[in-house]
Image (cartoon, rainbow, N blue to C red):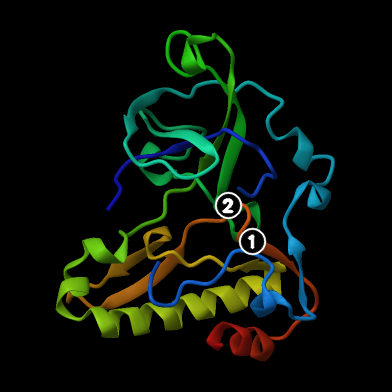
């Protein structure tokens, strides 16, 4: 389980929204050709206030050690050494979406003594709420009952995807197992599941749709 805050340093900002056995394709394939699925999130979906998310310099952000993990379209993940705007340092994490309530703040920040790559230039960063749990392969339940665990994870991911699509008009289509956190009960059974990665190009806009249609799409 991650116990610290991460900051995501975006290398290529394409929008503000930056394989298990049931992974889905990220491109607009035949699978994605549903009348209720719109185009991928892109700059065209941004409002004027969205385009200003990296204009300010962040104050009071103290970086800790850099983590070895690194995703696409960023230059690194870092711990925060202290709390930020009443959000405890252990409760903030990167890579999420405002629509699902993960976003904390964003802006420009100098990384290290001389800035990113030593060029003394601020770097765009995003602060996100920490998501509890760990990736499934790191849990004892994965070793004991992998097939059943995947089945249970899929059911809970399905519920979350339906809720986001119907209520938030956001469709996640990339379900890499390492981009999912699970929380186990004290007895070692599955309690909750969180989809973490809202990075381009696996997030689509959604037109009006009901839960049954999203469920049918997910089950294909």
Residue appearing at x 36%, y 57% in the figure:
132
Q: Which mark is residue 203?
A: 1
Residue furthest to the front in view is: 30
In this view, 217 is above or below 121:
below
> Relative to 114, is 33 on the left or the right?
right
Residue drawn where x is 61% and y is 76% of the image: 163
Residue 188 appears in view: yes
Relative depth, front residue between 131 and 12? 12
Q: Measured along the vertical axis of the image, is residue 195 above or below residue 126? A: below
As measured in the structure, the alpha-carbon distance from the residue carrying label 1 to the one carrying label 2 is: 7 Å
* Disc ID at residue 144: none
**Vertical arrangement, residue 24 with respect to residue 98, above or below:** below
The picture places residue 58, in percent across and down from the top left corner, at: 58, 24
Near mark 1 (Cα within 10 A), the count class, few <14, some 14-19 or many ≥20, is many
User: At x 47% / y 72%, what residue is drawn?
Assistant: 23
Q: Position of residue 135 (x, y in %)?
A: 32, 61
Across and down, in percent, residue 192 comes to 37, 72
Place residue 176 in its image quadrant. bottom left
- Relative to 146, is 196 on the left or the right? right
- Say which residue appears at 68% left-offset and 78% top-offset: 30
Would you say 184 lies left or right of 43 here? left
Disc 2 element? loop
Position of residue 193 in the picture relative to residue 213 (left or right): left
Tag 1–tag 2 contact (CB < 8 Å) = yes
Q: Which residue is mark 2?
A: 199
Q: Nearer the viewer, residue 104 or 196?
A: 196
Among the 4 quarters of the image, the one containing residue 100: bottom right
Residue 186 visible somewhere in the drawing: no
Q: Residues within 10 Å of mark 2 (few under 14, many from 20)?
A: many
Circle 1: element type: strand
């Amino acid at each position: 389980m991650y116990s610290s805050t991460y900051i995501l340093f975006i290398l290529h900002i394409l929008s503000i929204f930056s394989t298990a056995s049931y992974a889905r394709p990220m491109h607009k394939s035949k699978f994605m050709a549903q009348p209720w699925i719109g185009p991928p999130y892109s700059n065209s979906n941004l409002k004027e206030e969205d385009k200003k998310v990296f204009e300010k310099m962040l104050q009071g952000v103290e970086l800790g050690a850099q983590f070895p993990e690194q995703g696409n379209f960023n230059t690194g993940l870092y711990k925060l050494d202290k709390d930020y705007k009443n959000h405890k340092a252990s409760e903030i994490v990167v890579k999420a979406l405002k629509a699902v309530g993960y976003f904390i703040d964003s802006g420009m920040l100098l990384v290290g003594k001389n800035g990113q790559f030593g060029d003394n230039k601020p770097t765009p960063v995003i602060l996100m709420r920490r998501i509890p749990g760990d990736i499934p392969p790191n849990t004892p339940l994965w070793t004991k009952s992998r097939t059943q665990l995947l089945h249970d994870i899929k059911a809970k991911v399905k519920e979350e995807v339906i809720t986001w699509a119907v209520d938030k008009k956001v469709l996640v289509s990339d379900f890499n197992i390492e981009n999912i956190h699970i929380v186990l009960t004290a007895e070692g059974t599955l309690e909750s599941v969180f989809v973490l990665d809202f990075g381009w190009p696996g997030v689509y806009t959604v037109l009006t749709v009901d839960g049954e249609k999203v469920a049918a799409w997910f089950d294909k």
